[in-house]
Image (spheres, helix red, strand yellow):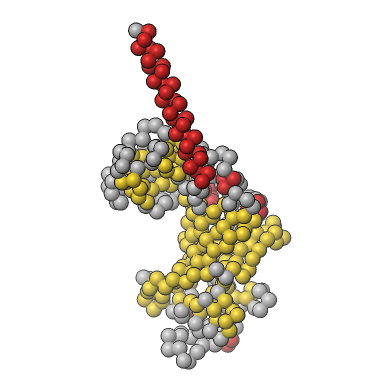
């Protein structure tokens, strides 16, 4: 009998040692594979105009200039006014002093959105970033030219318009200033069409780093390492510099399925974002699964019984466990 008890203790010790080893490997994996944090905006934006000095103005309609040689051009009046939605943005933090942002806007317009004004190539569609402390500008860049424009086809809500995804990327946002929750941040897009003479200064999306409101619209990454059997939360690596200053969720939820519709669930887990899950994972090694995850925190909790609620879903991914 004593032998059996000692054997159980030995098995528990070995199991604990194995779990600790898996956790250590998972932390190392997270350090080497930091992922961006995606924040879903889906915010209708207001169009503004500016003069040559960057001051916001009311657009004088008699200054409109269209090109008769372009039959696709529409006169710029209220019926042809473009609309825009701030779609989402990704933030990646390097382990030095900078952040990288990739921001996406959806612009609906009858006139094509172009990279530069047809009458002056020096006038370009640009992204803009600004950090302010009250009314004081802490940092900004108003001419981010790393722009891509994708024509998504007709606007499903208005067949006279085309829908464009306009994106920009910027690699050198000062990390400490961006992570300061007392500062306000703005993401802007200024676009030109094939027809309009003046710049259209896109709607302004203001980002507040209030932990709860930001976290409830963000998709923080979950780290998976099937080879070592671990699931890591975004804050599992306490020493990882890419977590500093961020509004992190208290919990995260992940689910796996054999199919991309998630009609059946192979495994699901609601866990603390500081945890590495190493035991009780009922997934078969060498099997392909689809998975998705979301945040659970104050203001957007996942119900621990029904698993409904929470922040927005991540995209659906697949992996061999």
Residue at 42 percent across and 43 percent down: it is 224
Q: Is residue 103 left or right of residue 174?
A: left
292 lies above or below 151: above
Q: How many marks?
A: 0
Question: If the image is split into quadrants, where does the C terminus sit?
Answer: top left
Q: Is residue 2 left or right of residue 112?
A: left
Q: Is residue 101 left or right of residue 231?
A: right
Q: Is residue 299 left or right of residue 57?
A: left
Residue at 40 percent across and 53 percent down: it is 315
Residue 287 position by quadrant = top left
How far across and how far down the image is residue 117, in percent?
55, 81
Residue at 47 percent across and 50 percent down: it is 219
Residue 60 in sight here: yes
Residue occupying the far right of the picture: 136
Residue occupying the far top of the picture: 1
How far across and how far down the image is residue 157, in percent?
38, 71
How far across and how far down the image is residue 24, in percent?
49, 35
Residue 304 position by quadrant = top left
Of residues 36 and 4, the one nearer the viewer is 4
How far across and how far down the image is residue 141, in percent?
64, 66
Residue 297 in sight here: no
Residue at 66 percent across and 63 percent down: it is 140
Question: If the image is split into quadrants, where does the N terminus sit?
Answer: top left
């Amino acid at each position: 009998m004593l032998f059996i008890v000692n054997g159980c203790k030995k098995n528990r010790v070995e199991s604990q040692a194995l779990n600790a080893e898996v956790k250590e490997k998972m932390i190392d994996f997270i350090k080497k594979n930091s992922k961006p944090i995606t924040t879903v905006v889906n915010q209708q934006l207001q169009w503004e105009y500016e003069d040559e000095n960057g001051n916001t103005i009311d657009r004088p309609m008699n200054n409109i200039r269209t090109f008769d040689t372009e039959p696709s051009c529409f006169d710029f009046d209220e019926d042809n006014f473009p609309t825009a939605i701030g779609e989402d943005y990704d933030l990646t933090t390097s382990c030095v002093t900078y952040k990288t942002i990739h921001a996406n806007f959806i612009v609906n317009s009858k006139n094509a959105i172009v990279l530069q004004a047809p009458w002056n190539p020096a006038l370009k569609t640009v992204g803009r970033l600004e950090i302010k402390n009250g009314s004081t500008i802490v940092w900004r860049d108003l001419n981010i030219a790393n722009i891509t424009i994708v024509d998504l086809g007709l606007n499903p809500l208005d067949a006279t318009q085309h829908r464009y995804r306009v994106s920009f990327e910027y690699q050198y946002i000062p990390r400490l200033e961006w992570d300061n929750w007392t500062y306000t941040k703005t993401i802007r897009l200024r676009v030109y069409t094939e027809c309009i003479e003046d710049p259209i200064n896109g709607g302004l999306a203001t980002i507040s780093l209030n932990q709860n409101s930001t976290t409830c619209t963000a998709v923080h990454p979950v780290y998976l390492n099937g080879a070592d059997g671990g699931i890591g939360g975004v804050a599992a690596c306490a020493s990882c510099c890419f977590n500093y200053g961020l509004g992190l969720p208290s919990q995260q939820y992940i689910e796996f399925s054999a199919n991309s519709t998630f009609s059946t669930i192979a495994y699901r887990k609601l866990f603390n974002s500081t945890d590495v899950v190493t035991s009780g994972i009922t997934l078969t090694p060498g099997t392909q699964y689809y998975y998705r995850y979301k945040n659970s925190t104050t203001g957007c909790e996942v119900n621990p019984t029904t698993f409904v609620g929470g922040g927005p879903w991540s995209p659906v991914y697949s992996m061999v466990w």
